[in-house]
Image (cartoon, grey):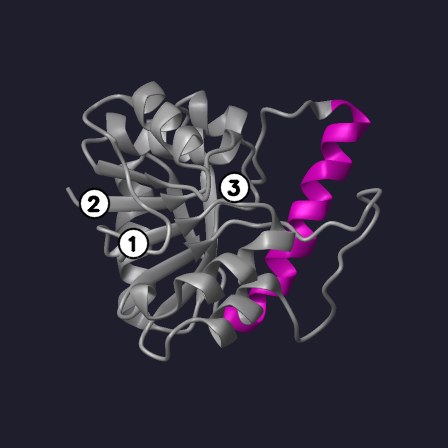
């Protein structure tokens, strides 16, 4: 297994970190609030640790698990500390009332993160079509992902598989915007009665 660094200490950080720790990965939690990072590391257990925001993350895989509005700033502030890392963007850039996105065609938070990250870091969009409740539920749900670098995508696919998720490659990073719209679809389905512990999925017929 490998070391996974998670930026953020909210519900999705807890869900992904908890499932990854149970799968045997070493977890590092990074937050601008050290107390929140330490609290989540303690909650995750399995020898999870709290890193220091600004230091180089321990993991080759770095999960950006903050709200979309703060994701680019977090990556920008970390700067060269992310050199050579595979960065997983899990964000959904909803507008204020959740009726649309703040991004548009040819644009995504993943694209913006890629522009802010070091040139040798690689961004992969993933986890944004799965609620934290579905991750905590430990079910083998589908995990769509998209990115440009074949090596980074293979690393993320292996990580998703290790969590007993079913990785489905959606294509290049230009598909990240489509995945963000899929996140909006997920919210619509939830609001219409499906609940908030679900994930979008596909099934071969």
Q: Which of 20 and 6 is in front in this view?
A: 6
Q: Are marks 3 and 1 in contact (CB under 8 Å)?
A: no
Extreme-left residue of the structure: 1
Say which mark, if any, is on residue 160: none
Q: How crowded is mark 2: few (under 14 residues within 10 Å), some or many (20 or more)?
A: some
Reading the image, the residue beneath label 2 is 3
Residue 61 appears anywhere in the view: yes
The percent position of residue 125, horizontal first and vertical second, equals: 48, 58
- The span shown in magenta is 172-193
Compared with residue 27, is residue 114 higher up or lower down, i.e. above or below?
below
Q: CA separation, marks 3 and 1?
A: 28 Å
Reading the image, the residue beneath label 1 is 61
- Residue at disc 3, secondary structure: loop
Q: Residue at x 77, y 38 (%)?
A: 188
The percent position of residue 158, horizontal first and vertical second, equals: 26, 50
What is the tally of numbered marks visible in this picture?
3
Q: Residues within 10 Å of mark 3 (few under 14, many from 20)?
A: few
Reading the image, the residue beneath label 3 is 203
Residue 61 is left or right of residue 75, and the answer is left
Q: CA separation, marks 2 and 3?
A: 31 Å
The numbered mark, 2 or 3, whose residue comes first in the sequence reads 2
Q: In which quarter of the image is the N terminus?
A: top left
Residue 172 appears anywhere in the view: no
Q: Do the residues labelled 2 and 3 touch (CB within 8 Å)?
A: no
- Residue at disc 1, secondary structure: strand
The percent position of residue 78, horizontal first and vertical second, equals: 40, 62
């Amino acid at each position: 297994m490998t070391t996974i660094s998670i930026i953020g200490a909210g519900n999705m950080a807890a869900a992904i970190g908890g499932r990854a720790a149970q799968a045997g990965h070493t977890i590092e939690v990074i937050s601008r609030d050290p107390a929140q990072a330490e609290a989540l590391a303690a909650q995750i257990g399995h020898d999870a640790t709290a890193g220091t925001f600004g230091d180089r993350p321990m993991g080759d895989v770095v999960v950006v698990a903050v709200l979309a509005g703060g994701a680019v700033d977090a990556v920008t502030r970390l700067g060269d500390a992310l050199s050579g890392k595979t960065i997983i963007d899990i964000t959904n850039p909803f507008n204020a009332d959740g009726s649309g996105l703040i991004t548009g065609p040819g644009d995504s938070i993943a694209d913006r993160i890629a522009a802010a990250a070091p040139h040798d870091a690689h961004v992969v969009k993933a986890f944004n079509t799965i609620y934290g409740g579905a991750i905590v539920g430990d079910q083998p749900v589908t995990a769509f992902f998209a990115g440009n670098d074949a090596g980074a995508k293979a690393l993320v696919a292996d990580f998703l598989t290790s969590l007993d998720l079913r990785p489905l490659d959606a294509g290049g990073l230009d598909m990240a915007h489509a995945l963000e719209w899929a996140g909006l679809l997920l919210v619509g389905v939830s609001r219409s009665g499906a609940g908030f512990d679900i994930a979008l999925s596909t099934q071969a017929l």
